[in-house]
Image (cartoon, grey):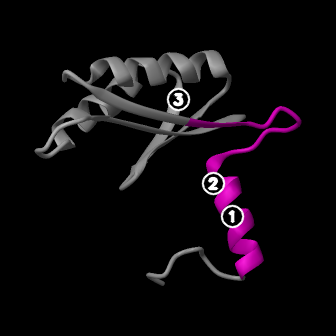
């Protein structure tokens, strides 16, 4: 996978957003992407930007509400294959440990 992105989709509401966020995450299943959700968004990996943008749009469209906020940050490394895990591993190598405070 060569395109890595951070996607955050949420309705602008006062109550819990979990149900609507779950709809956005479920919409990703229809696309050829790998993803992992964390507390601040969902990291998505795709082979190309066409698939990434289609998946992000589906996630955005899946959320019900009068107002939906979507943020998409893309790292499209074109010179070589990479993955989200490669990025984490590189930081871990520099630190000499996993990049987390819980271990």
Q: Which mark is residue 85?
A: 2
Report x, y in % for residue 49.
65, 21
Q: Nearer the viewer, residue 95 or 86?
A: 95
39 relative to 91 in the view: left or right: left
Say what secondary structure mark 3 lies in: strand
Q: Residues within 10 Å of mark 1 (few under 14, many from 20)?
A: some
Q: Identify the residue at the far left of this view.
A: 15
Report x, y in % for residue 14.
13, 44
In the figure, 53 relative to 37: above or below?
Answer: above
Report x, y in % for residue 97.
65, 81
Q: Residues within 10 Å of mark 2 (few under 14, many from 20)?
A: few
Start-end of magenta stretch = 73-95
Q: Which mark is residue 27?
A: none
Pointer 3: what residue?
33
Q: CA distance from mark 2 to mark 1?
A: 6 Å
In the figure, 59 relative to 102: above or below?
Answer: above
Among the two numbered marks 1 and 3 on one chain, the one whose residue lies closer to the N terminus: 3
Q: CA distance from mark 1 to mark 3?
A: 20 Å
Question: Does 90 appear in magenta?
Answer: yes
Q: Nearer the viewer, residue 84 or 6?
A: 6
């Amino acid at each position: 996978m060569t395109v890595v992105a951070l996607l955050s989709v949420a309705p602008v509401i006062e109550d819990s957003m979990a149900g609507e966020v779950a709809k956005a995450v479920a919409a990703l299943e229809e696309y050829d992407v790998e993803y992992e959700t964390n507390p601040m968004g969902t990291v998505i990996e795709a082979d190309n930007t066409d698939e990434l943008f289609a998946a992000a749009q589906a996630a955005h469209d899946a959320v019900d509400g009068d107002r939906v906020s979507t943020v998409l940050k893309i790292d499209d490394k074109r010179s070589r294959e990479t993955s989200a895990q490669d990025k984490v591993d590189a930081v871990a190598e520099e630190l000499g440990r996993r990049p987390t405070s819980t271990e």
